[in-house]
């Protein structure tokens, strides 16, 4: 048995150095070297011995280091194997593996791009091109699909995750990029299988780069189209309309159509391709009236028409007779700054069966320029199924629409508003207190009311204040028949804060009597114009807060964002 000490675990002899110097020995030799003194005979003999024996000793060190390094390498390799096995075991019992495919699919859907997202114009052109390619390829979904084989299989084999595609053809002008995009687009369309497709197409450049390849490919899948947003804005529209013609009669799933822009020369032709779409219920439109007339308006439940020129108002009102679906919610935005109001040629009455009618003006920069807008509709229309009427304010509307009071009373009478009108929004209507009181007096079923104070510069800066003590007192609930709007459950105001807080308090608390507003809390919004802000009575706020905690009231206050420049000089 060897006399060398051994490792207690592996019984391998423990490495023992033979010539490892002491610190004092090294210090003596350093001192000799530094002071240029010659060593003694003993010192010289010691150095010669070290010089001759060191190679063997160093080789012995190298051998031991190699042996230990092999052990360390194996330990590190074994550690990695254990770590990988630990991760595998952890993944095997991970809760995410028990997550149903349906839940994972819903999570994956958050990574699918919206077909109707606008371009990020802050990016450089090449960055936009790369972004377009990433959207078409569904790059974010592909990235998360790399987590594991199950996720990859689920992502690639779920058609609904490949059914939202937005295309901006202005980015398809470069031929190398276009070829790659077309390949990726075909793959995405094929992976969508028969799943309903949401599709956005924006053709906006000189010649519609790539349209001759792209449009025929997309129309092959028209039977899958569920939501379509189409914008064609070309100097040379060429054969675009012909390329789209194959979708005619092949739109069995189309539910929502957004026509943003169509060249007038091809508008009617392109619109006619969508005349037969049995499931179409929602239409957003910006274009000419002749093209609109080609669309199936009778079946719509939602219709939004942006930027109607004033010269086409009478023709549009005549077209509204085609809204025969009592569920139809109609919103129209009139561009007062496009053209002039023409003399009414067609003044024949029009009956429309819509349930909600919203009207707003755009480009209203003078208070008198909008005078005829609301009157044109009120004079000719009869609305026997109307539940909600909204006169709304848009961003580029500096002035409210004038209120045609006598004409509205006639409309209310012939349409029997007293029997079915439940919501009245006068946010952008220039109406006096007396006119409002008379209007409300014959609307016993009204539940929602929106009103605004105004200050109209063209009228010498006169304030038209609706939210007054007298109005709030008339709206304060009483058990007798003197209360206006007995069913009121929601009041929103844009206000100059010209009322007394005690009157507001009495009005609100009166509406909280037991047995009323059983469908939810009574709601009040007080939105003030910034230059007229004042603190509301703290005791009143405390009372309202207490009633809110009991679920009887929802009281909100904020700065108003309507007519943001209305009270400033031009």
Image: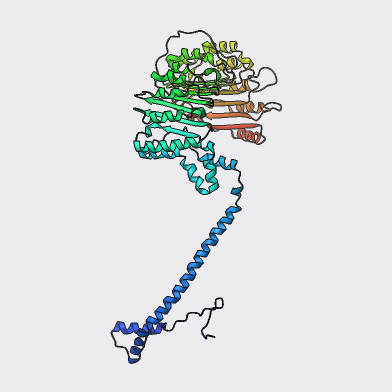
Specify the quadrant of the image occupied by residue 151.
Answer: top right
Scheme of image coloration: rainbow
Instruction: Please identify the residue farthest to the left as the structure is shown.
Output: 36
Q: Nearer the viewer, residue 426 or 420?
A: 420
Determine if residue 289 is in view.
yes
Viewer can see residue 375: no
Q: Position of residue 23 (x, y in %)?
A: 41, 82
Q: Quadrant for the C terminus, please.
A: top left
Above-or-below relation of 43 to 508:
below
- Extreme-right residue of the structure: 515
Estimate the x, y position of residue 469 in percent, counting from the top left: 58, 23
Q: Is residue 166 left or right of residue 298?
A: left
Query: Quick check: 410 left or right of 47?
Result: right
* Quadrant containing the N terminus in the rendered view: bottom right
Q: Nearer the viewer, residue 198 or 150?
A: 150
Q: Residue at x 47, y 40 (%)?
A: 138
- In the image: residue 38, left or right of residue 544: left
Residue at the image point whose x is 42% and y is 28% from the top: 215
Q: Position of residue 555 (x, y in %)?
A: 60, 32
x and y, in percent, of residue 318 in the image:
50, 12
């Amino acid at each position: 048995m060897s006399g060398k000490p051994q490792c207690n675990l592996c019984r391998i002899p423990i490495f023992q150095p033979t010539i490892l110097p002491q610190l004092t020995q090294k210090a003596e030799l350093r001192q000799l070297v530094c002071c240029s003194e010659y060593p003694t005979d003993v010192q010289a003999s010691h150095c010669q011995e070290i010089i001759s024996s060191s190679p063997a000793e160093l080789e012995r060190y190298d051998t031991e280091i190699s042996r230990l390094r092999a052990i360390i390498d194996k330990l590190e390799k074994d550690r990695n194997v254990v770590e990988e096995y630990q991760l595998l075991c952890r993944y095997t019992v991970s809760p995410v593996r028990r997550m149903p495919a349906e839940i994972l699919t819903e999570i994956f859907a958050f990574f699918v791009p919206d077909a109707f997202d606008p371009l990020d114009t802050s990016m450089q052109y090449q960055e936009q091109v790369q972004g377009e390619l990433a959207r078409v390829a569904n790059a974010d979904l592909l990235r998360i699909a790399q987590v594991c084989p199950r996720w990859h299989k689920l992502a690639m084999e779920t058609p609904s995750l490949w059914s939202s595609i937005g295309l901006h053809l202005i980015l398809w002008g470069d031929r190398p990029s276009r070829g790659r995009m077309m390949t990726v687009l075909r793959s995405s369309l094929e992976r969508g299988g028969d799943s309903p497709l949401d599709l956005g197409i924006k053709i906006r450049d000189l010649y519609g780069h790539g349209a001759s390849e792209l449009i025929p490919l997309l129309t092959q899948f028209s039977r899958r189209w569920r939501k379509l947003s189409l914008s064609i804005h070309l100097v040379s529209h060429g054969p675009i309309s012909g390329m789209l013609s194959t979708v005619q009669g092949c739109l069995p799933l189309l539910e929502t159509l957004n026509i943003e822009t169509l060249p007038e020369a091809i508008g009617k032709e392109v619109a006619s391709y969508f005349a037969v779409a049995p499931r179409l219920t929602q239409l957003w439109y910006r274009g000419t009236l002749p093209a609109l007339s080609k669309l199936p308006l009778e079946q719509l439940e939602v219709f939004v028409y942006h930027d109607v020129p004033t010269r086409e108002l009478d023709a549009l009102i005549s077209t509204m007779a085609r809204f025969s679906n009592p569920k139809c919610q109609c919103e129209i935005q009139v561009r007062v700054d496009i053209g002039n109001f023409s003399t009414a040629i067609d003044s024949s009455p029009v009956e429309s069966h819509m349930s909600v009618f919203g009207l707003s003006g755009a480009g209203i920069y003078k208070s008198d320029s909008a005078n005829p807008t609301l009157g044109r509709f009120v004079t000719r229309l009869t609305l026997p199924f109307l539940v909600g009427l909204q006169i709304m304010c848009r961003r580029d509307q500096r002035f409210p629409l004038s209120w045609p009071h006598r004409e509205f009373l006639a409309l209310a009478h012939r349409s029997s508003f007293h029997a079915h009108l439940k919501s009245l929004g006068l946010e952008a209507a220039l109406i006096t207190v007396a006119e409002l009181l008379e209007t409300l007096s014959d609307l016993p079923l009204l539940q929602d009311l929106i009103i605004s104070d105004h200050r109209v510069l063209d009228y010498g800066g006169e304030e038209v204040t609706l939210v007054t003590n007298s109005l709030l007192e008339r709206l304060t609930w009483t058990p007798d028949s003197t209360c206006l709007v007995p069913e009121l459950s929601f009041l929103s105001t844009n206000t100059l804060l010209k009322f007394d807080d005690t009157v507001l308090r009495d009005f609100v608390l009166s509406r909280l009597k037991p047995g009323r507003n059983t469908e939810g809390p009574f709601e009040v919004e007080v939105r003030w114009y910034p230059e007229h802000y004042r603190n509301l009575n703290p005791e009143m706020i405390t009372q309202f807060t207490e009633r809110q905690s009991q679920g009887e009231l929802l009281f909100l206050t904020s700065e108003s964002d309507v007519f943001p420049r209305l009270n400033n000089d031009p």
